[in-house]
Image: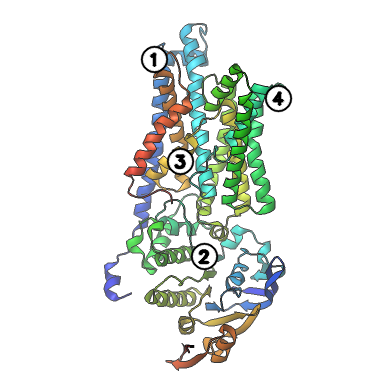
Amino acid sequence: MTKVEFKDMSFGYDTKIILDNINITFDEPGLICILGPNGVGKTTLVKCINKLLVPVSGTVEFNGKDVHKMGYHEMAQHLAYVPNTSGNVFSMSVSEIILMGRHPKAGWTMTEADLNAVDEAIEVLGLQEFANRDVRALSAGQSQRVMIARGLVQEPEVLILDEPTSNLDVKYQMGVMKFLKAYARDKGIIVIMVCHDLNITAAYADRVVLVYNKGIYADGSAKEVLTAENIEEVYKVQAKVNEVDGVPHIFLVPEFD
Amino acid sequence: MSKAEEIQLEKTNFGSTYRKMVAKRILFIAVCIVACVVLAIVSAIIGTYPMTPGQVWEQMAIAILGGDQTTTIYHVVMDLRMPRILGAMVCGFGLAICGTAMQSMLKNPLADPYTMGISSGAGFGAALAILLGIELISGGGVVVNAFIFAVIPAGVIMFLSRFRQATPTMMILCGTALMYLFNAITQLFMLVADPESMSAVYTWMVGSVDGVSYSDILIMLIITAAGSIYIQAMSGQLNVMGLGDDSAKTLGVNVERRRLIVMLVVTLVAASVVSFTGIIGFVGLVAPHIVRTILGSDNRFLLPAAALFGAVLLMASDIVARTIVAPSMLPVGVVTACLGGPLFMFLILRSSREAWA
């Protein structure tokens, strides 16, 4: 069983501690959403899972092994990461960029399986019409779908996404969330994503982790975590939470002078 | 996505597209190899002492199998023309593969042995030997001085990377700063130099494959071949590094370590070439870009294709350099820029898509 475990992990820049003594375990397949206000350390938390950031103390373990003792190549066999932005300088087609997701598993030459994986990822993310287009010519939302596709062809046990829906319109936000939830369930993998939209998260997340004040403020199902009290305490905004078809629906109460 | 949209969007067949791309890239590489052979033959037969391909072949057979090696024609083919043909081939190949690797690794279209300070360092080392008679290793002369000073900018950049976590942008800015520093000091030396020494430095600075010996070529060839094999083996990792450091790490590449090793290798290759030929600019910068506009940016194919194209560009430039104002000769670096510049401009203007950001 795949397991990611933070053990007394703290992270900081210089002398400023961002995350303090984090203890949390991800061991159930499903879509896990990390929520919290800006600058609270959501991205920092997920970047500590795949060695992009080094904790100042404590450990992050993947299947019982400290990730900082794993090589990058070994780690890439199990964990994939979809960043928030891409920065290609040179021209490459969408298909070629997605194919790079096969790098940890492929050799110098690409097999039929590698090429088929690209076709499948293009199809599930609806990128057919852009497949041969220069990736730099795409909109931010289309680029995000390309990066998600690249993460999928890596065929990871843990897929980590940093705000993958931030540039998508509502239709694609819901489409991507629905897909990731089903993908996690069907493949039996852990999908951990940083997100901001409370209602989209409430609708699709199997588990919600609310980060606040250098630690994990709440952890559980959307119903347990996304309460009016928690939202008010963490985001400093007034909220009303109703249930619609069994899913919490958050209404943020506007304040006017 | 609506049902109607789902029906409209057919499944892609990337396998077919990919195989066509690979075939096109292999064809380009094959064309470059043929062009190298053709240019070698053309370069061997034309000049102030014209001859037929058969005569050239005879002299090569004499060199390999033995025979009368005292004839004028043997001297022209084997002592004058063949070394500069091979020199141009190895030098063009080496500079182009270095430029391609540097641009991909640093994600910067302007990276090449010149902008990274390698060529300027070599120029400074050569000026020290020619103008001041200073030899870092006794008897090493211009070549050893040029090599050692060519490696210094990369050493500084690698030191910064190791201890200050230098980003690709920091690395290229540091290289450019060192380029200006070395150029400025070299210019200062030239201001106080006597005309004869200044002319010698200037000739070295514009670069030439004239006078390169077989032993020089052997050294260049060994270092270039070994470096090229390593860089080619890393081509997949260079591709992934183009996605950004975070993405590359999570795709299995130890970015910092790989960048340092590739930097070291390309520096040794470029330094070995410019130490013997002087500063031949433009090939390392432009050959990768020209090939990128034709083949795309996949380094697995771009690296060998750009290297071979660099060899073609330099061999063609050398033919022009030694024939256009015969019996005098132009510096090959000048011709390379004059040939490559317009070709590059044409491709930029013709291309419907930019090959770089």
Q: Residue at x 52, y 27 (%)?
A: B206
Mark 4 or 2: the one toward you: 4
Q: Can residue A250 be seen at all in this image of the molecule?
A: yes
Image height of B353 relative to A55, above or below: above
Residue wearing tag 1: B54
Residue wearing tag 2: A83
Q: Can residue B143 be seen at all in this image of the molecule?
A: no
For label 1, the crowd category at 10 Å Cα-Cα, with few meaning under 14, some 14 to 19 and many 20 or more, is few
Report the side of B181 relative to A94 (left or right).
right
Tell me the amino acid under the disc marked 3.
Pro
Report the side of A53 relative to A138 (left or right).
right
Callout 1: SS: helix
Tell me the amino acid under the disc marked 1.
Gly
Determine contact: label 4, label 1, CB under 8 Å.
Answer: no
Tell me the amino acid under the disc marked 2.
Pro
Tell me the amino acid under the disc marked 4.
Glu
Residue wearing tag 3: B288
Q: Residue at x 39, y 43 (%)?
A: B25
Return the disc, 1 or 3, that comes first in the chain's sequence.
Answer: 1
> Mark 3 belongs to which subunit?
B
